């Protein structure tokens, strides 16, 4: 069981790498994480979204539980996220998709088992990566009944 993050863009900037490494060291099974980066498209706007979305769809397995991050997605509390991910991990792997600057196509959102909004705010992609890994760590701690998350 694993959580893969599929992100459009360059590798982590150093300050993001440090933060991700901190949570990665703390993550416990079944929340093992891996990262796969897809290059930004050199095309403009809608054509970039289409090209990047095509690359994303090519990387998704048939049996994966797919979570797409999108500001128009469903907002979840940390306990709700924990429950959804823990159930998904019980039946296989989870892939979290972070699209490019222009987002993803409707086809990618339709493939998703969950379209999740971190916030109604829009964040830089590097910061999203750090928020995501912290929320995955929190989800694991909640699922295990450990005291990291305070209600």
Image (tube, rainbow, N blue to C red):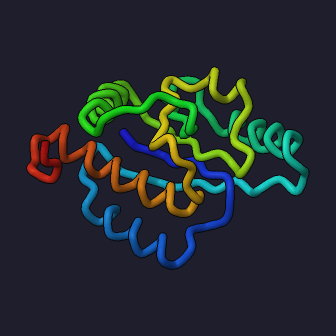
Q: Quadrant of the C terminus?
A: top left
Q: Quadrant of the N terminus?
A: top left
Q: Is residue 21 left or right of residue 114?
A: left
Q: Quadrant of residue 3?
A: top left
Residue at the (29%, 52%) spot, across then down: 137
| Above or below, 148 relative to 106 | below
In the rendered structure, the answer to whether residue 59 lies left or right of residue 31 reads: right
Pick whichever, 110 or 33, lies toward us: 110
Note whether 109 is above or below 68 in the view shown: above
* Residue at (57% x, 32% y) in the render: 72
Q: Nearer the viewer, residue 120 or 150?
A: 120
Residue 148 place in picture, x, y as percent: 15, 53
In this view, the residue farthest toward the bottom is 14
- Residue 50, percent from left and from top: 82, 37
User: Residue 44 in the image: x percent, y percent?
Assistant: 89, 50
Q: Residue at x 14, y 41 (%)?
A: 144
Which of the two residues, 68 or 120, is positioned nearer the viewer here? 120
Q: Is residue 78 left or right of 111 when viewed as pictured?
A: left
Name the side, left or right, on which 2 lies relative to 83: right
Q: Relative to 44, is 51 above or below?
A: above
Q: Residue at x 61, y 51 (%)?
A: 7
């Amino acid at each position: 069981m694993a959580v893969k993050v599929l992100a459009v863009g360059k590798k982590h900037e150093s300050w993001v790498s440090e933060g991700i490494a901190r949570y990665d060291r703390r993550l416990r099974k079944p929340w093992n994480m891996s990262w796969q980066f897809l290059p930004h498209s050199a095309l403009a706007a809608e054509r970039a979204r289409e090209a990047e979305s095509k690359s994303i769809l090519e990387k998704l397995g048939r049996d994966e539980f797919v979570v797409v991050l999108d500001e128009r997605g469903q907002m979840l509390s940390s306990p709700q996220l924990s429950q959804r991910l823990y159930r998904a991990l019980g039946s296989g792997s989870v892939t979290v998709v972070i699209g490019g600057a222009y987002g993803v196509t409707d086809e990618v959102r339709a493939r998703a088992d969950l379209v999740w909004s971190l916030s109604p705010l829009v964040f830089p992609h590097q910061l999203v990566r750090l928020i995501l890994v912290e929320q995955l760590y929190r989800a694991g701690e909640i699922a295990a009944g450990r005291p990291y998350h305070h209600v």
